[in-house]
Amino acid sequence: MSLAAILYWFKTNIGGNHMKKNIHLIKGLLILFTAMLFVLACKKDKGAYDFDNQVNEFDGNAYEYLKAQPGVYDSLLKVADRITWLKDTLITPSDFTIFAPTNRSFTLALLNLNNLRTTQKKSNINLGNANLDQLDTLLNRYFISGRFSTDSLLLTDGASMQTIKYDYGMHAMEVNSNAYGFVHGGPKTIKYSDVKGSQYIVEWQRTTTQAVNIFTHNAVIHVLTPSHEFGFSEFTLRLNK
């Protein structure tokens, strides 16, 4: 029964002259009505927190895993296939971590770059003809030496890490959301940062994951959110030559 229906019932059956005499009854019913709504809302919302922090294991190497996800990592693989050392790393036995950008991340970067180039009357750039040295520099920032699952990032300040080539500094920290009835009981995510050579967090470029802890024979893979623009805000600057 809605609040409007309750008020209409009182107006029809009790009348205005008796409202003051029944004020306590009205308050009691309204409190009961509010409590019922709260209970129903809690039951409805609880379903939103039904999650399972799965640890996914793939029977193959990192390259095989990426290839097995059509429509997700095509852009990443297209660039990796142009960079010999990176493709070799994805295939050979080793220990590394990938913060994997999806197709959407590359689409955003190319869109912003080519929108600017259009205003400058320059031809469009794609991943097949983009400067290979610049792609090498940027893609390297998503590949970290050593295996880092979320269990490796439990320190309050997170963990500093180095890329597998050029020893470029990056940073990652685990972030837990709150689930129903549990503080820090929600799905695990990672905040991943390009520190830009600075100790000041305000100067870092940061993104987050949408999936974590995918284990292959040679790597741990964390999937970055689709809203991340590939290159940590440097793609247009480096490729618009």
Image (cartoon, rainbow, N blue to C red):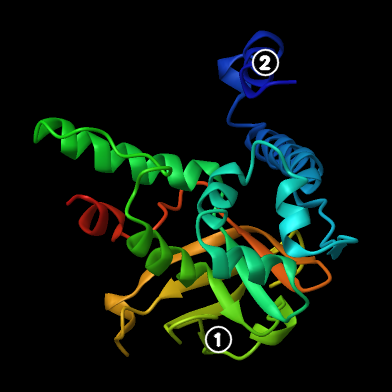
Name the residue: 43% across, 42% down.
Answer: 128
Which label belongs to residue 5?
2
| Image spot of residue 232 (x, y percent) | 36, 62
- Considering depth in this image, is 14 or 178 the residue closer to the camera? 178
| Image spot of residue 16 (x, y percent) | 56, 17
- Considering depth in this image, is 169 or 75 the residue closer to the camera? 75
Which label belongs to residue 158?
1
Outermost residue, top side: 12
| Image spot of residue 9 (x, y percent) | 70, 14
Quadrant that contains the N terminus: top right
Report the Cα–Cα distance between label 2 and label 1.
Answer: 54 Å
- Considering depth in this image, is 72 or 16 the residue closer to the camera? 72
Disc 2 + disc 1, Cβ < 8 Å: no
Observer-side mark, 2 or 1, equals 1
Does the image show residue 141? yes
The count of marks equals 2
| Image spot of residue 111 (x, y percent) | 33, 37
Horizontal arrangement in the rendering, residue 166 relative to residue 99 (left or right): left
Mark 1 or mark 2, which is nearer the start of the sequence?
2
Which amino acid, mark 2? Ala
Which amino acid, mark 1? Gly
